[in-house]
Amino acid sequence: MARSENNGTTRNEEKMSPAELNGTPEGFSTSRLRQAFPQFCAVSAKNLLMITFGSTLGFSTILIPELQKEDSEIPVTMEELTWISSLNLFLVPIGCFASGPVSQFLGRKRTMMLTTIPFIAAWITFYYATTAGMLFIALAMTGLTGGLLEAPVMTYVAEVTQPHLRGMLSATSTMSIILGIFTQMLGGKLGNWRTVTMINLIYPLICFAALCVVPESPYWLIAKGRQKEAENALCWLRGWVSPIHVKAEFQTICQEVQKPAETKEMIWKSFGKRTFYTPFLLVTSAFFIGTFGGTSTLQTYAVMIFDSLEAPMDKYTAAVFLGLAELIGTLVCVFAIHFTGKRLLTFISVGGTGICFCLVTIYGYLNDAGAIDTENISWIPTTLLIGAAFLSHNGIRLLPWVLAGEVFPANVRSSATGIAGSIGYVFNSIANKVYLYMVNGMSMPGTFLFYALINFAGGILLYFILPETEGRSLKEIEEHYAGIQSLKSRPRKEELAFKEKWAASNPAVVYDDTESKL
């Protein structure tokens, strides 16, 4: 009898489609909303951590102008000021070294909860800071912790979501960071920077409480031999259902986790192949253009720049509008990229950003020469800079992060993404570090001319090296870099249905015991 029941179970499972075995809605009797809501809750808890990290990135925007004042509470030199704008970004890659191993040892959820502690300590240190050294300590904690959360955050989303929700929920990470940055610009408008640090304490505290409620990654639990806990976690994530509803997906995950991992020798050989180094050059080029194209430093030094250009409004108000433009630009990118594709959106982004900076350059040179009366037209450069922030976040500032998750081969994707992301943070830190020296040596109009030229040259470069990956499967992208086929445009509409079905039945989760983001 038992044998007959087992055979019946096997026949039923054989009749299931691959999509059902991967936990997509077809295999569930519960509603789509009920399935999606707990996954949204789990990702939202993680996003509170991204908002916390974003607040640490945006804090320098309101701190730097306060330190520049003659009666500043903390006297600093220009060299110390440049380090305040960049130290945390320099240290993010160092935190990435420990990110993968710590996440693998403690678990995704517990590692994320752990990172809230140094964030809390950093904000308390900021509040009581009386010297530049104390500011450096707080910045170092935020940078190292930002690197530490890299692996658990990226892995957790992939391991708790269903394939048809994964892309959309993954895109909320960047949006959450931008939201965290925006809260700092808004806070600088409404209160003193020390008051803002106390408000910022709320984010990690709420995040810790929220993470206590959501489950651990089922993949990690199964890898640790905690099958019952993994099954309970999966039941929670799929709509608080009973184990019978997730049986097929649970078995699929068990099989995925128990696959023999590739040897280190095989993985290292993959780094020498064209399928790795060609997309790696693309992603790092996109990071370089997005960073040295000017909007990274514009974000950090927004208050100072608007003050220099004599904006027709309060400089902190102008910074709030800049942050709002970045946030709206990010939202537009998330929704528009599926309709326009990456290439068109990227060219509009770099071209529009370059034109805005070029016009600001012309305005600056005319103003320095006394050729125009700026009293009634000071709104022009302010509008152009806010426009540049919006256009850059429409495409080029998000492009490398989107590409990093899809252009690398599966067997090196985790490490390659971590390396490329770390290089992006280093680029940001260098751009912020040298900005004040560039302004002193080249003047502000000269600096913006440099940014405009980077955008124009970057647009030309991307025209030749950027494939259209939107609507393409991961296999097609890998074949493009292997030279088997060329991705010059988006697939036809009739091809999309097949590709979406293929993606649903082939979730891009690669489990690796030696996981590391760097």
Image (cartoon, rainbow, N blue to C red):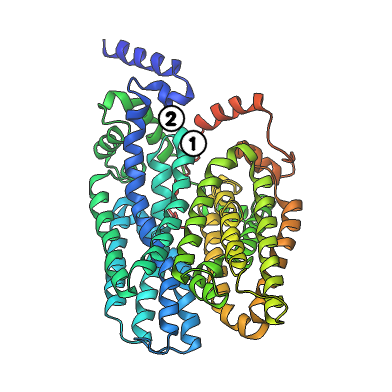
Q: Where is residue 497 in the image (x, y as percent from the top left)?
A: 59, 25
Answer whether residue 44 is visible to the viewer in this image.
yes
In the picture of the structure, the residue carrying the numbered disc 2 is 22
Total marks placed: 2
| Displayed quadrant of residue 193 | bottom left
In the shown orientation, is residue 49 left or right of residue 292? left
Q: Where is residue 280 in the image (x, y as percent from the top left)?
A: 63, 56
In this view, 345 is above or below 130:
above
Give neighbour class at mark 2: few <14, some 14-19, many 20+ (Cα, 10 Å): many
User: Disc 2 vs disc 1: Cβ atoms closer than 8 Å?
Assistant: yes
Q: Where is residue 419 in the image (x, y as percent from the top left)?
A: 54, 61
- The three-letter code of the residue at mark 1 reads Pro
In this view, 311 is above or below 168:
below
Q: Which of 27 and 228 is in front in this view?
A: 27
Looking at the rendered image, the quarter that the N terminus falls into is top left
In the shown orientation, is residue 390 left or right of residue 244? right
In the picture of the structure, the residue carrying the numbered disc 1 is 507
| Displayed quadrant of residue 217 | top left
Q: Residue at x 31, y 37 (%)?
A: 38
- The three-letter code of the residue at mark 2 reads Asn
Q: Nearer the viewer, residue 467 or 380?
A: 380
The Cα atoms of the two marked residues, 2 and 1, are separated by 7 Å
In the shown orientation, is residue 3 left or right of residue 96? left
In this view, 98 is above or below 398:
below
